[in-house]
Amino acid sequence: MMRTSESLFFDIRGLRYHLRHWQGDPARRMVLLHGWMDVSASFQFMVDALAQDWDVYAPDWRGYGLTDWGRSDCYGFTDYIADLDALLDRIQADAPVNLVGHSLGGNVAAIYAGVRPQRIAKLVNLDGLGMAPSDPVQAPRRYARWLDELRERPRLKPYDNFSALADRMQKGNPRLTRERAEFLARHWGYASEDGGVVLRSDPAHKIVNPMLYRYEEARACWGEVTAPVLWVDASESDYLKRAGLSEAQHAERRAAFRRLHYVTVAQAGHMLHHDRPEEVARLIEEFFLQIA
């Protein structure tokens, strides 16, 4: 049975922020952070698979879903981190929180957990932390690319209808069932005034950030994380390959965390919470319920 969620709207740093809330026992609470070009409803299947009565919050990041678009030319980690800090003040200001992040959300959550270690009880990273280190020599071309993309701003491809969007989702992820694809299409997209269906995402997310990703700074933040960490990878994910990372580089990232438990989910790709929601829910639930 699909759990019903309510929509909450908070004023966060000048934006009207949308949070999806599956009401449950406040003593069992978790916050879920979605990835790039995704929305909060993406966690529905995993939430449905939880055995306990968890109180679950999941925001749509700025520029996604029902949250306002940002008011700058592109999106960067610093805004996500500041948004998360403000959101947690509204969700659970008086106690550390259990935090789960997928992909981009995992990157943001891991840095935040090192910047504000006292705010995090336990941290789960789902197939995240896959960005390759940068080199200062890349900066001139990165800035030039950013300027070029500002002139030729990207657009999101329209789809004929929600069924066509579901088709595209299944093409990108053959493990995704038709029922789940149809559900996600209704949350990832909306019917535009011109007819057809467009993703609920600001096209500016496609514009490269002019600032290089500084791995050394991120790793320094990870080293300050005091909470227990569950790192969950997917056996058939192409995330590392797309990011240009080696297995050794991935292992180096895991080693940055003091209290880490590492698990790989079989028969799952990068969207492991779509492919194996029952297994992901079980791992998260067991981890959060363990005595630290």
Image: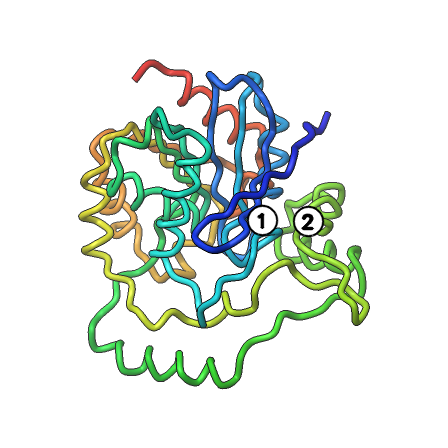
- For label 2, the residue is 187
Looking at the image, which residue is at 19% across and 39% down? 224
State the residue position of label 1.
39
Within 10 Å of the Cα at label 1, are there few (<14), some (14-19), or many (20+) other Cα atoms?
many
Q: Amino acid at mark 1?
A: Val
Where is residue 157? Give x, y as percent.
Answer: 66, 70
**Quadrant of the image occupied by residue 49:** top right
Quick check: 84 above or below 263?
below
Furthest residue in direction top, as rendered: 291
- Residue toward you, 80 or 35: 80
Q: Is residue 92 above or below residue 275?
A: above
User: What residue appears at the point 32 percent right and 57 percent down from the top-left corner?
Assistant: 245
Looking at the picture, how far across and down is residue 209, in whole percent? 38, 69
Q: Residue at x 27, y 29 (%)?
A: 227
The residues bearing labels 1 and 2 have C-alpha atoms spaced at a distance of: 7 Å
Looking at the image, which residue is at 54% across and 21% down?
54
